[in-house]
Structure formats: structure tokens, C-alpha cells
């Protein structure tokens, strides 16, 4: 059978990084083997599933570029099919009706807990012949003895004893199927050959295998991938920072950086850190995924992101940067070409948000000079070089980086100053702080009008400050 994998999120929240990594592993496994990748939305929990969450999942998948060959399928569209399977299990005596009350189940549980036993249903209604006319759930008749061996690609052989599993509810009183039932029907109907999912589902697997066996089917391959932990060793959650894929996008992370980061959480190839998607498709092997949990390390993600920002084309980075400029209230069309800005800044930012912040000055005046930079560079000694630069800038015929560079050099030469004594005050005057790309490109991109206006602001600032001290 051709390889088929699936990602089957429950739409009860955003697409978090753990889910995204499971999706990536499933996607890679399918791509590697020329198989199909299916997206299935497990939305049978009507109270917790939301349209907003479905959208967030679809948006996250699209942003990451994890395109699916089939789906999205929605479990709520398949309720009749689940009921058909449940009815046939019932007819064959492989499942039975149970009308145990909440009170009885609570008391049973209480008693088992007191006896230090694992709480489980005691099979009370197995032979009771409960009528379909009264309120009931349907339970699967789990084998009473024997073992289920899950031969997991990640975990190896995991053995479960049937006498520790109970008769699982497969249809609730309200007629809706439960997760374990719908998941196996879907995996069967969709011809899934590899179930790759979080290891929080490992305990469900023997139950699912038992139902499959009762239906006369053989189970798919399984790979249960470990959880992602926060830097403190506890399960990754909101209190560790961003956990949703879209939040990372909003923070200016590139999708390929996040994918590269996620794949390395639990999988490695020698000590290689940077992988293109094509390389991953070639090298990734689900059998090599580590069985122990890995911790999320934000710094490493930023390092990878910086790598991808540096090495991509300025055109693509500009396209991705544009909405982040918009978030700052800047329309890049109103100033220098964003591609040129990116070319100047590409080495200087580890996220697109940071790049937007350090590029705002190209498009609008800043409110005040950075205090430390102003104290150091906007002093009385800077009045003369700044004044001379201003004069020459206003007359410069060819506003290009090269002549601008010559101009700054000539001012330093004429005043017998080191280049830095001209360039640094000038930078603080035009940028507002002491860091920017080369002064020539900076002046060129900011444009003549804004440069002159900001130098005037700086001159005035120095004069006002000079009244307060004698520098
Ligand atoms: N819907 C389940 C979840 O989101 C996944 C089920 C599965 O992969 O089998 O946890």
C-alpha cells in the first residue's frame, strides 16, 4: 500500500508548536516516500471545537507550507459512518449497551481508588442485555486477557496487558462517537499507513488496535513522538512565551526557520543544524526520532531565523517585512524602496519585527535622540562638522552612496578630524541612535530632505544643551 500519513488536530485552540512538529514529521514521512499527507480536523467535541481554531490551524499549515494532498476532512461530516461501524460492532456482539448510572460509576471508582486499584469499568453491563430504548452508552468489548504489543517506530515495542484496559465507551448517551472510535474508522477509511502523533496518545493505541482487530483489520504503523518541554523542563505552555505558530509569524520568524528548528527537536543528522526542506525530505527518517522529550530553546530559534534572514533574497524578505512595517504604522510605499532597506539591514536583525523597528527611521522622523548616543555624540564639538556636512549635503548634485561617502570624507579631511568624529554625530542626527548601516547608504536611503531636517534638529539640540553646560 502507498505510504499515507495524516495530521489530525482537534480544533480547540491555536496550532501550537508541538502540533506543528507532529505535522512536519508526518508531512516529511509522506514526502520522503512519495506518499500522501492527509489533514483531518477532529471536531467531534462540539463544545470545545471552534471555527476560529479551524482557521488558525489552516492558516498555520499554509504559512508553514505543509501542503496536504487530501482534506481537510471534518469528522462532523462523517458521523453517519461512525454510527454504521458502531452498529455493526453491536450486531456482532463486539460491543454492548451500558446503562450504568453516574452514581454507580462514581462509587465503583471510589472503591477502586480506596483499594489502590487503577479505576476501570468492571464490565457490569457486559451480559445485561440493556435495551436500546433506554438511555445508554455503547462500550467496546475489550479482550479480557492477552497482550497488545505496539511496535512503535520511535518507542520500540511497548506491551500492554488487556486486563489493564477496560471496556471503552465508543458512543456517548447523546449518540456521538468518541475519539478512539472515530479515529480508527477514519484511519481505516482514509487508508492511513503511518499514524504519527504525540506520545500523549500512546495509551490509546492498544485500545485502537483492539477495535481494529475486532473489525478484522490490521493496524497501521505507529510513531509516537515525545513532547516538547519548556526551558525549565515542564511541558511547553503559554507561560514559556509564544507557543502558537501564528504568534511566531507575528514575531517575525520565517516559516523555514521554525520548520528547521522544529525538526531538530528530537531528530538529528550528525551535527548538521541547517537543512533545506529538500534535504529534510531526503534525510529525515521517522525511525531516527529520539524517544526522549526535548526542550524548546528560543535563542537557537533566533539564531536560525537570523541565518535565514541573512541568506534569503532581499526581495522575499522585503515582501515578508512589509506587514511588520504596517504594524508600526508605516507604508513602505511612502519612502525608500523596501528591497534596498532590506539589503542594508539584512545582517542586522534576527527577526522581521526587529528589522522593522530598526528600519522605521528610513520612513519617518523619530521622536527623540537616544539619550546615551546623544550624550556621547551630539556635543558642541559636533556643531562645526554637522554644519559643514549640512551645507554640502544641500548642494550635492548626485544623491548616491558613493558621492555621499566622499562628501563625509571631505568634511573630515577639511576639518582635520577622524572620519568617526563626523560620521558618528551625523549618524545620531539622522538615525536617532548610534547604530545603522553604513553612513553613505543610510544618508542615501533617508533622502536629502529628511537628512537636512534631522541635522537641523540635532544642531538645535546641541545648542540648547550647550546653554546648560560648557562642552
Ligand atoms: N485529535 C487528536 C489530538 O489533537 C490527535 C489524534 C491522533 O493523532 O490520533 O490530540
Image (spheres, rainbow, N blue to C red):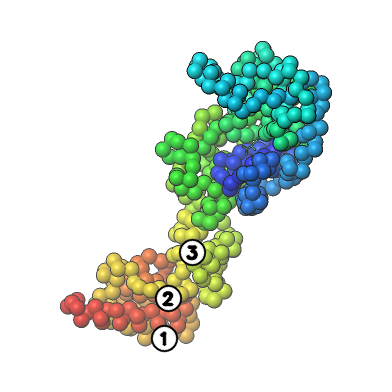
Crowdedness of circle 3 by 10 Å Cα count: few (<14), some, many (20+)?
A: many
Does residue 361 appear anywhere in the picture? yes
Q: CA distance from mark 2 to mark 1?
A: 18 Å
Q: Secondary structure at mark 3?
A: helix
For ligand 1, tell me if the residue under mark 3 lies within 8 Å.
no
Q: Earlier in the sequence, mark 2 or mark 1?
A: 2
Image quarter hosting the N terminus: top right
Q: Quadrant of residue 389?
A: bottom left
For ligand 1, tell me if the residue under mark 2 lies within 8 Å.
no
**How many discs appear?**
3
Q: Position of residue 131 (x, y in %)?
A: 78, 24
Q: Is residue 262 left or right of residue 6?
A: left
Crowdedness of circle 1 by 10 Å Cα count: few (<14), some, many (20+)?
A: some
Eyeballing the image, is 130 above or below 282? above
Q: Earlier in the sequence, mark 3 or mark 2?
A: 3
Question: Which numbered tag is attached to residue 394?
Answer: 1
Q: Position of residue 243 (x, y in %)?
A: 52, 46
Q: Position of residue 216 (x, y in %)?
A: 79, 22
Q: Residue at x 48, y 73 (%)?
A: 363
Question: Which numbered tag is attached to residue 365?
Answer: 2
Q: Is residue 267 left or right of residue 440?
A: right
Of tags 3 and 1, the one toward the viewer is 3
Q: Residue at x 57, y 74 (%)?
A: 333
Eyeballing the image, is 154 above or below 382? above
Image quarter hosting the C terminus: bottom left
Amino acid at each position: 500500500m502507498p505510504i499515507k500519513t495524516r495530521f489530525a488536530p482537534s480544533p480547540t485552540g491555536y496550532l501550537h508548536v508541538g502540533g506543528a512538529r507532529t505535522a512536519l514529521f508526518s508531512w516529511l514521512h509522506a514526502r520522503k516516500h512519495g506518499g500522501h499527507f492527509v489533514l483531518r480536523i477532529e471536531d467531534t467535541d462540539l463544545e470545545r471545537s471552534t471555527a476560529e481554531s479551524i482557521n488558525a490551524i489552516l492558516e498555520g499549515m499554509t504559512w508553514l507550507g505543509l501542503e496536504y494532498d487530501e482534506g481537510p476532512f471534518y469528522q462532523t461530516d462523517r458521523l453517519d459512518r461512525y454510527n454504521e461501524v458502531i452498529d455493526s460492532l453491536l450486531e456482532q456482539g463486539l460491543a454492548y449497551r451500558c446503562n450504568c448510572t453516574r452514581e454507580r460509576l462514581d462509587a465503583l471508582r471510589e472503591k477502586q481508588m480506596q483499594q489502590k486499584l487503577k479505576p476501570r469499568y468492571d464490565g457490569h453491563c457486559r451480559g445485561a442485555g440493556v435495551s436500546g430504548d433506554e438511555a445508554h452508552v455503547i462500550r467496546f468489548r475489550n479482550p479480557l486477557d492477552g497482550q497488545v504489543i505496539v511496535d512503535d517506530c520511535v518507542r520500540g515495542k511497548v506491551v500492554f496487558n488487556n486486563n489493564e484496559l477496560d471496556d471503552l465507551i465508543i458512543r456517548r448517551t447523546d449518540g456521538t462517537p468518541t475519539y478512539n472510535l472515530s479515529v480508527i474508522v477514519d484511519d481505516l477509511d482514509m487508508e492511513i499507513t503511518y499514524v504519527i502523533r504525540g506520545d500523549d496518545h500512546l495509551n490509546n493505541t492498544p485500545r485502537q488496535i483492539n477495535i481494529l482487530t475486532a473489525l478484522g483489520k490490521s493496524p497501521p504503523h505507529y510513531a509516537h513522538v515525545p513532547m516538547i518541554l519548556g526551558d525549565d523542563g515542564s511541558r511547553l505552555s503559554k507561560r514559556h512565551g509564544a507557543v502558537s505558530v501564528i504568534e511566531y509569524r507575528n514575531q517575525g520568524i520565517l516559516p523555514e526557520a521554525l520548520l528547521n528548528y522544529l525538526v531538530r527537536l528530537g531528530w538529528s543528522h550528525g551535527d548538521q543544524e541547517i537543512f533545506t526542506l529538500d534535504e529534510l525530505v531526503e534525510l529525515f527518517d521517522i525511525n531516527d526520532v529520539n524517544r526522549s522529550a526535548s526542550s524548546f530553546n528560543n535563542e537557537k530559534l533566533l539564531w536560525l531565523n537570523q541565518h535565514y534572514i541573512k541568506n534569503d533574497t532581499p526581495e522575499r524578505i522585503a515582501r515578508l517585512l512589509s506587514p511588520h512595517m504596517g504594524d508600526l504604522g508605516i507604508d513602505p510605499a511612502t519612502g525608500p524602496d523596501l528591497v534596498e532597506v532590506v539589503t542594508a539591514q539584512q545582517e542586522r536583525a534576527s527577526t522581521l519585527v526587529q528589522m522593522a523597528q530598526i528600519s522605521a527611521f528610513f520612513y519617518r522622523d523619530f521622536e527623540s535622540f537616544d539619550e546615551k548616543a546623544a550624550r556621547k555624540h551630539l556635543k558642541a564639538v559636533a556643531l562645526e562638522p554637522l554644519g559643514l556636512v549640512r551645507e554640502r549635503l544641500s548642494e550635492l548634485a548626485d544623491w548616491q552612496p558613493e558621492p555621499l561617502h566622499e562628501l563625509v570624507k571631505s568634511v573630515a579631511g577639511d576639518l582635520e578630524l577622524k572620519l568617526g568624529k563626523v560620521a558618528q554625530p551625523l549618524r545620531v542626527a539622522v538615525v536617532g541612535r548610534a547604530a545603522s548601516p553604513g553612513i553613505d547608504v543610510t544618508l542615501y536611503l533617508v533622502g536629502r530632505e529628511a537628512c537636512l531636517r534631522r541635522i537641523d534638529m540635532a544642531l538645535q539640540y546641541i545648542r540648547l544643551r550647550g546653554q546648560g553646560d560648557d562642552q
